[in-house]
Amino acid sequence: MATTKNGETITLNRAQLTHAATIITVGGQTAGVGRPGVLIALMAALTESSLRMLANTGSYPESGDYPNDGNGSDHDSLGLFQMRPAAGWGTVHDLMNPSYQAHAFYGGPSGPNYPSPRGLLDIPNWQQLDPGAAAQAVEVSAYPDRYQNFQPVAETILTTLTAPTTGTGNTGNSNIPETTRVVFPLPDGSWVKTGGFGGRADPFTFEPDYHFGTDYGAADGTLIFAVADGIVVHAGYTGTWGGLIIIEHTVQGERVASYYAHMWEHGIHVTDGMTVTAGQHIGDVGSSGKSTGAHLHLEIRPGGQGQPAIDSDKWLQDQGAEGLTDGETSRASCTLGGHK
């Protein structure tokens, strides 16, 4: 159950929540979307279809042959986001697929509708718009003010469906599903390896030191991705680490924690207890804490949070991480040597 902005209480069924989960998952796997973009997509689908996969047999008789949650009659629109084949969103076959509709709504260079009609990522400065206005910019509805009414419902859905199934945060949740894949934490071609795992000289004091992670130099603001499906157990600012995210995963039956350090506070896009998918945009590269330049400090800790770290670069190679390319080694750019 959830309550709209105007005070109406609505109840969502399993089918509606399944579609919401699809929208959340596709958003998590699409670079640049983040939690704000997923919220906007949920608001749009709630408004357009009540999160139902609607056929439209009046305009497209064949649409009734696909799995659906009912028959709509809004001109020639179809599906969760009420997209129109005639407007270029896709074929009837395409638009009767919930995952396709979610990809099309988010748009961007990887969207099936790029460059037109515009998805959310194709709207200039969409992050600065009111969420309802951003939804309207994609949907181009005759009723532009109706999306805001569903923002509280979308917030409730997003919070509920991204919460861990048992336990939260640092409570030691042992029910983390096996990850579906392992990915490299930065976009291809955006990084240079600037520091490896092991002994070195501290770049501040020049004293002998030990580096427990791998540093990847990248431009300030470069997207950071979760290396695997998992649950966020820490997301916040922590002194020497700067902006730090810790995610716990299950990889090949083993508990593994991944650490992502040195983000600016505003560059952290997840919260404690949030469920994330491999490749989800969780933060942006920064240079906070004890750091000499913009980069990602990545640590991998088998056994979970607080356990000894291993060579994260080698671990990614051993896992055959998607998007892994060879980096060029240069100087180390952070000093987490003796920390934890």
Image (cartoon, rainbow, N blue to C red):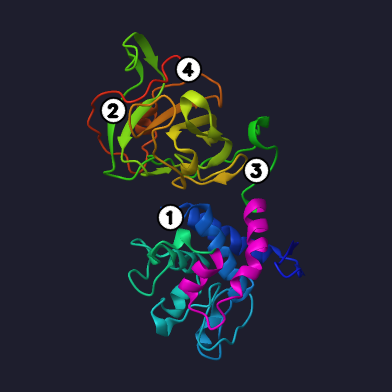
Horizontally, residue 246 falls left or right of residue 221, namely right
Label 1 to label 2, Cα distance in Å? 27 Å
Q: Earlier in the sequence, mark 1 or mark 3?
A: 1
Q: Earlier in the sequence, mark 3 or mark 2?
A: 3
Q: 197 above or below 180?
A: above
Q: Are marks 2 and 4 in contact (CB under 8 Å)?
A: no
Disc on res. 148: none
Q: 193 above or below 97?
A: above
Count neighbours of disc 3 (C-alpha within 10 A) and say few if under 14, some if 14 to 19, many if 20 or more: many
Q: Nearer the viewer, residue 287 or 56?
A: 287
Image quadrant in which you'd find residue 14: bottom right
Q: Are marks 3 and 4 in contact (CB under 8 Å)?
A: no
Disc on res. 339: 4
Nearest-to-viewer mark from 3 and 4: 4
Label 4 to label 1, Cα distance in Å? 33 Å
Q: Nearer the viewer, residue 7 or 329?
A: 7
Identified at 39% across, 71% down, the residue is: 118
Give, as a single range, the part of the protein colored magenta: 131-160
Label 3 to label 2, Cα distance in Å? 35 Å
Q: Main secondary structure of the magenta part?
A: helix
Disc on res. 30: 1
Q: Are marks 3 and 2 in contact (CB under 8 Å)?
A: no
Q: Give the residue type that dot 2 points to.
A: Thr
Nearest-to-viewer mark from 4 and 1: 4
Q: Give the residue type that dot 4 points to.
A: His
Label 1 to label 3, Cα distance in Å? 21 Å
Name the residue beneath numbered marker 2.
194
Q: Is residue 136 magenta?
A: yes
Horizontal and vertical percent for residue 79? 54, 75
Name the residue beneath numbered marker 3.
164
Q: Give the residue type that dot 3 points to.
A: Pro
